[in-house]
Every structure is written in C-alpha cells, then in structure tokens.
Amino acid sequence: MAVLLGVASVSCIFGSYSLAGSNEGSQSISVPDEEQLRTKYRQRDEALNTNDFKVLYYIRIKPEFRKEVSLDEFKKWYQLTNREFKTELVKVCACRVQKSGMRCSLLSHWIISAPDEQTKDFKILESGEYVDGTWYLTYTDHHMLDECP
C-alpha cells in the first residue's frame, strides 16, 4: 500500500500535533507488512474480548517503553467489561519515517457491543508504529472521523 508523506496539523483537546499527510510535494512510500498490521487488529480484538492483558500489552507497548510501563501498571489503564469488540483497519491515512521506524495514522472501524446497551459503530483515528519488523497499535484517539484528516 502506498501512502503520501508530508505534514498536516491537527488540533484536538490535547493541543495541536502534526501528522504525515498529503501535502503538495509529498513522496509516495510503501507501508510495510500490511497483513501483519491487519493481524494485529484481530489479535487486539481477541485480547479485548477475552481480557488477555498480556497480549494487549505486547500489541500496544513498544519494547523501549516496557521498562517504564510494567504489565501490572498497564492493567490499571484498562477496565475490560462484558463487551465485545470488533475492529478493522479501514485505511492507512499517512506515515512518517522516524529514527526508530515508521509511525502511521490509521483510520479504524470499531464496533462495540454489550448486553443491554446499544451497539456502538464508529470510525476513529489510531496511531500504529512499525519498529524492527513489528507493528504496534500505540494510540487510539477519541475523535470519531469518517475519513482521514
């Protein structure tokens, strides 16, 4: 999959940040191992649906941060309840090559269902990082979007 390199600014509750985007003069690059990225979505769903914090930890926390965030500390961030998650990659919006690898903005489709609650079906922006041949789903935004910014 080819994605354009460039910089776009996005504002949110946490302030402004830059994303690689489709600015004039951008270069086209290939996103590595898209099938592994899609597999990470399926593994995350299974981990969320079975309360498997260890798998979720290894999908979300890159090795360089595991020294700072233990599995026990990570578990405190999540309150997994009786919900079923189904997520999928809609598209890779844009990527930026970094010293440690590649960071991409990902448009994701989420469906969350729970007993006695209306099913939530939405698209959201996430951050994925490709480091040393492995994809990590590092950040999920709280803004619902229908398209890449």
Image: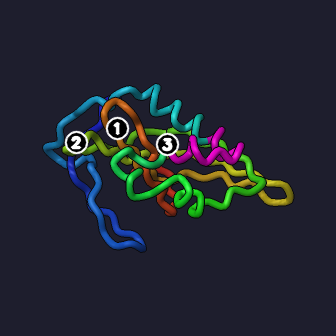
> What separation in Å lies between label 1 and label 2 (alpha carbons)?
9 Å
Q: Position of residue 107 (x, y in %)?
A: 46, 46
Q: Foreground: 75 or 92? A: 75
Where does label 2 land, which residue?
Answer: 97
Q: Which residue is rendered at x = 65% and y = 38% of the image?
A: 46
Element assignment for label 1: strand
Badge 3 marks a residue whose secondary structure is helix
Q: Main secondary structure of the magenta part?
A: helix
Can you give x and y, in whole percent of width and height, for residue 42 in the image? 59, 35
Q: Residue 130 carries which label?
A: 1
Q: Which colour scheme is used?
A: rainbow
State the extent of the magenta-drawn residues as a range.
45-57
Circle 3 sits on which residue?
58
Q: How far apart are marks 1 and 3 (CA)?
A: 13 Å
Q: Which amino acid does label 2 sit on?
A: Val
Left or right: residue 132 versus residue 43 is left
Marks 1 and 3 close (CB-CB < 8 Å): no
Looking at the picture, tell me which residue is in the foreground, 110 or 48.
48
Residue type indicated by callout 3: Tyr
Q: Are marks 2 and 3 in contact (CB under 8 Å)?
A: no
| Relative horizontal placement of residue 111, taking residue 119 as reference (left or right) | left
CA–CA distance between discs 2 and 3? Answer: 22 Å
